[in-house]
Image (tube, helix red, strand yellow):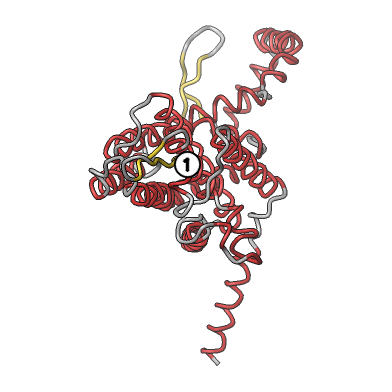
Amino acid sequence: MCKNWQDEHGDFSSVNMDTAVAIRTLEATYKSSADAAAVESMILRLTEKEGPLLKSKGKASNATRIAVLTWRSLLIMSREWKFYWLRLILCMLLTLCVGTVFSGLGHSLSSVVTRVAAIFVFISFTSLLSIAGVPALLKEIKIYASEESNQHSGAFVFLLGQLLSSIPFLFLISISSSLVFYFLIGLQDEFSLLMYFVLNFFMCLLVNEGLMLVVVSLWQDVFWSILTLVSIHVLMMLAAGYFRVRNALPGPMWMYPISYVAFHTYSIQGLLENEYLGTSFAVGQVRTISGFQALRSAYDISSDNNSKWENLLILFLMVVGYRILVFVLLHFRLGTINPFTEFFNVIRIRKVQAQDE
């Protein structure tokens, strides 16, 4: 191949030289030059000086990873309308429907049973609508599985980052829905009671989020996760103490353990204690009964004024408990090879093989 080559005097001449030979000639010329020796010595000095610092900077601390994961999740949740914005719209629409259906109740003794029904419908149905977030949670768990396989994240970092990033959106849902429901239903016009209502509903949403994480971590499938969650919610609603007072439920299954595991029970009980403890209702012209007595036949609550805070504490412990359970599932990688999904896959394959035969 004909190439232009510059000789020692700076003159260009046309010579025949193969490309590979030219490359080798250039490499040999560079390696034997003073520039190559200067570059190698500079690289050696920089490596000795910055090596340990660069190695330490390459491993991010847990706090840094949690902060980065929280910020990334916040950005994703705020941009993806299916994560929490859809749930906010659904909860607001449901709250408006429930509030208008149960509006104008008044504060007489006859309104107690109807108001109990309104609170039960609000807590139960908004929790049920939260199942719409299953695809988003499944997406987050799949992202975690990918990052964990590359040792970029851990179960604790993922759970804490997911919790911190979801708190602003869940609180927005709780305060917006609670304000609409509270004033449409006509609950007591007192700021401290309103704040307890918001906090109770916020804890209820956090518990439900933890339950959804547990189910999604086990199944890692949208269809089976939604089916399981709907079934669990229906069982919890039946045992929550509205359709039948909890003390009157059959013991072996409905009272123990379902009614005590259902977060609906503690949320509704706390809201009713917040509304009716310390109140009284007139019966006839001269007699009055307390709010506790008025609720006795409709719902099982405690007469202790601190009972509503105990119910709130139980909800908080449920939030922690569900997160710990998810941590165990993710830490031991029970979702990597899902036994439930594998079981149904084997059954489906055998049915297909039987049909082919």
Image vertical order of residue 106 relative to residue 262, above or below? above
Tell me if 177 is positioned left or right of 299 in this view: left
Image vertical order of residue 132 relative to residue 285, above or below? below
Residue at point 39%, 46% (across, down): 119
Kindly give the residue lying farthest to the front in the view shown.
286
x, y percentage for residue 210? Answer: 56, 45
x, y percentage for residue 300? Answer: 52, 50
Q: Callout 1 environment at 10 Å: few (<14), some (14 to 19), or many (20+)?
A: many
Q: Name the foreground residue: 341 vs 199.
A: 199
The residue identified by callout 1 is 205
Tell me if 36 is positioned left or right of 264 in this view: right
**Amino acid marked by disc 1:** Leu
x, y percentage for residue 270? Answer: 50, 40
Q: Secondary structure at mark 1?
A: helix
Kindly give the residue lying farthest to the bottom in the view shown.
357
Q: Name the foreground residue: 341 vs 134.
A: 134
Residue at point 41%, 37% (across, down): 280
Residue at point 74%, 8% (across, down): 49
Location of the C terminus by quadrant is: bottom right
Q: Name the foreground residue: 107 vs 26.
A: 107
Q: Can residue 76 be seen?
A: no
Residue at point 58%, 56% (across, down): 259
Q: Name the foreground residue: 161 vs 42.
A: 161
Q: Quadrant of residue 19?
A: top right
